[in-house]
Amino acid sequence: MTHTSPLRQEVRSIESQVYELIRDRIVRAEYAPGSKLLLIPLSEELQVSTMPVRSALKRLSGEGLVAYRPNKGATVEPLELDAFLELQEIRVAIEVLAARTCARRADPSVITEMRAVLEKLRTGALSLEELIALEWQGYLVCYRGSDMPRLVDLILEHGRLVERYSRAAIGEVFDRATSAAEYSDLIAACEGRDEDAAQRAVEAGLRRHIRTLSAQLQKKEDE
């Protein structure tokens, strides 16, 4: 059995923290599209050495969030309509598969948990950010009910990739009543073991987001 040294664990922890911090600032547009992310200024700002910053930028480059060039730093990638549409079509395919499988299994404990989320979504005194997080949590309850962990990992990965686009229009995309109605339809589909209805419920929300965000991204590209 091999053991990771405490020092190596600490280094990895710092790298992960730096990665999450830079990523969060990109997603929240604190580092706007086109912004330069220079190694030394970033390390000074974050009060760490250049090594974890370099590692974070390479990782973010792999996610398509930054364009990284050795010895030249990185630039925050623009929000592009084509990239968004590709990511969303992948999401539609994998999330529909998870929802259909959950409906086929119809685990009573999963449906009970989904109903608890729906109640909070309808009546909870929550901020916009909390509502967005709750909605995503609710769909993940369903997707995990598919009992397909590798598929759920793919869904989480692509959810993170599209997060920056969603946040760019977070206040205009989210409608609480519509969200609750779509989620209620998904619960009913799972209760009735109706795979087609589950697919329609999931697609309705994703397609609505595609239409709204596509219009906004197209407008930005035309400006």
Image (tube, rainbow, N blue to C red):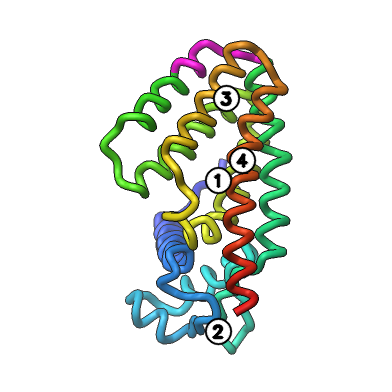
Res. 20 in view: yes
The quadrant of the image that shows the C terminus is bottom right
Q: Position of residue 100 (x, y in %)?
A: 69, 24
Element assignment for label 1 = loop
Residue wearing tag 1: 2
- Report, in whole angstroms, how far the alpha carbon at label 1 lies from the one at label 4: 26 Å
Residue type for callout 1? Thr
Q: Which mark is residue 73?
A: 2
Where's the N terminus, which quadrant?
top right
Region of the chain picked out in magenta, as a range = 105-112
**The disc labelled 4 sits on which kind of residue?**
Asp
Q: Is residue 59 visible?
A: no
| Amino acid of disc 2 | Gly
Mark closer to the chain start, 2 or 4: 2
Q: Residue at x 54, y 20 (%)?
A: 187
- Cβ–Cβ below 8 Å for labels 3 and 1? no
Mark with earlier residue (3, 4): 4
Magenta span: chief secondary structure:
helix
